Image (cartoon, helix red, strand yellow):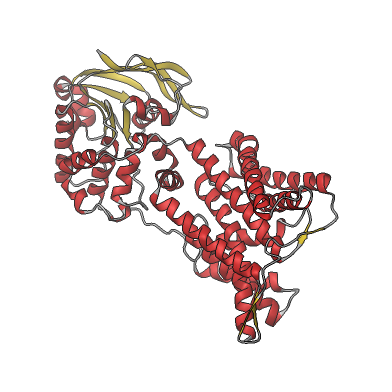
Amino acid sequence: MNILQYLINGISIGSVYAIIALGYTMVYGIAKMLNFAHGDVIMVGAYICYCVTVYLGLPVLAGVLLSMVVCTVLGITIEGLAYKPLRGTPSLAVLITAIGVSYFLQNAAQLIWSSNPKSFTSIVSNMKPLHLFGSLTITGEVIVTVAVSVVIMIGLTWFTSSTRIGKSMRAVSEDRDAAQLMGINVNRTISITFAIGSALAAVAGVLMCSSIPVLMPTTGSMPGIRAFTAAVFGGIGSIPGAMLGGILLGIIETFAKAYLSTQFSDAIVFGVLIIILLVKPAGLLGKQVQEKV
Amino acid sequence: MSMLKIEDIHVYYGAIHAIKGVSFEVNEGEIVALIGANGAGKSTILKTISGLMHPRQGTINFCGENITHTEACKLLPKGLAQVPEGRRIFLQMTVQENLEMGAFIKKTVNPDDLDMVFQYFPRLQERRKQVAGTLSGGEQQMLAMSRALMSHPKLMMLDEPSMGLAPILVDQIFDIIKELHKAGTTILLVEQNARKALQIADRAYVLETGKITLSGTGAELAKSDEVRKAYLGG
């Protein structure tokens, strides 16, 4: 029965990684950049939700919605101020800028909220855990996390495959110049991508801090790196790949912690990543399209 | 009346002076060909007209409007479409989705427009749901042209439509260019296949290393000794 319990916990934390990984993968696919500040947007989202519910005493739903709004604006602002001026410059310049933005957000959070950890109240604190077969416990957090991530995945898949804007995002991701010749405004498409990715980061932040209730300015950095790994694992640029990669990473991490070593769990996760990439360099669902001449 | 007027443009790739003062025009209802060897700058000129690159000097006017520094994505709504070199269709999207992207500026896809392109290219109708990357080279060229047609452009610029195609397909593509022209589309054609291009062009310009060296009607150029030696194999 233990195995099943670990599997459930792994899927739960993996769902959070998957939501974060979606932000990495969409931005990479469309803007062709690694937004290393993405993890810190998660942290900002969690702090906003914390402030709204604790300081303003508003209901949880208001906290989640407001943190999504703030993160969306933050994402668009970061893109417009830090990344857009660098469009067309070598990708290394953008990468370093992203790392700079990451530190900027962490330090700003430290100034505003201090570096003392805050104890985050779970958004589903009043939900009773389910007990199945005696020993199996499914907490409210697990149920909500998995349900929300399933809804997000279905929603995003529908959006990119069936809507005009979603399809134009796929077009930009495949060939930016050709998309412009279709009259698609690439700058606006990139802004929309950042907006969606950052709103998802806010959701991920709230879900993650509901399961692991310690909130600090550095809260987002390690999950951010793990989710980035998940995106590469699944095939960066691929939306289903990010979902699969996130969930697999969560499961591997949980099993590694349970059966092998808590301290070495990250090393094991990255070890598995290296092996997968040796076998499939483009990731599990990475695009390997052959061009016909 | 001149629909597209290019005056003394200079285009650079970094420090490389690729286009050195080119001027030409395309009148409404014409087929104009731009011929020249590899590296002469033909594609660069098209990219500059369609806003993917910008000239350092000179002006580009389209339908009386100065578009020298207009962003690429704003030109299709004005009626200027480009079928780029190497087709550049969206390989991971279906044929239908590619056509929808061609009609992106129209918000909704008009079924009549789909019928129109399927009339020109019945093969595409059969392959509507197929992913574009699985099409043959000729079909991909057809899709690239159809995609550009979806917005009903006034001027269609075609960059090397015959590249990499079997002679029979080249004939088909050129027949369709003639049909499009008859239906009222003005055409600017960039080609390495000078013989084919001069056959259908009303007027043509010869480009050599960033400069226009000759111009005239298609028939005149096809007879000229210089063109015959350099581009038509004697």
Quarter of the figure with the N terminus of chain A: bottom right
Residue B35 visible to an observer of this rendering: no
Q: Nearer the viewer, residue A182 or B104?
A: B104
- Count the labels in the image: 0
Residue B65 quadrant: top left
Q: Position of residue A250 (x, y in %)?
A: 62, 69
Q: Position of residue B224 (x, y in %)?
A: 17, 21
Residue at 67%, 64% (x, y): give it.
Answer: A124
Q: Position of residue B80 (x, y in %)?
A: 32, 27
Q: Nearer the viewer, residue A99 or A255?
A: A255
| Above/below status of B137 relative to B19 | below
| Above/below status of B109 relative to A130 | above
Q: Taking B61 as reference, is A12 left or right?
A: right
Q: Taking A219 as reference, is B30 left or right?
A: left
Residue at 65%, 85% (x, y): give it.
Answer: A2
Residue B198 quadrant: top left
Q: Position of residue A167 (x, y in %)?
A: 40, 47
Residue B115 visible to an observer of this rendering: yes
Q: Taking A87 as reference, is B26 left or right?
A: left
Residue B229 quadrant: top left
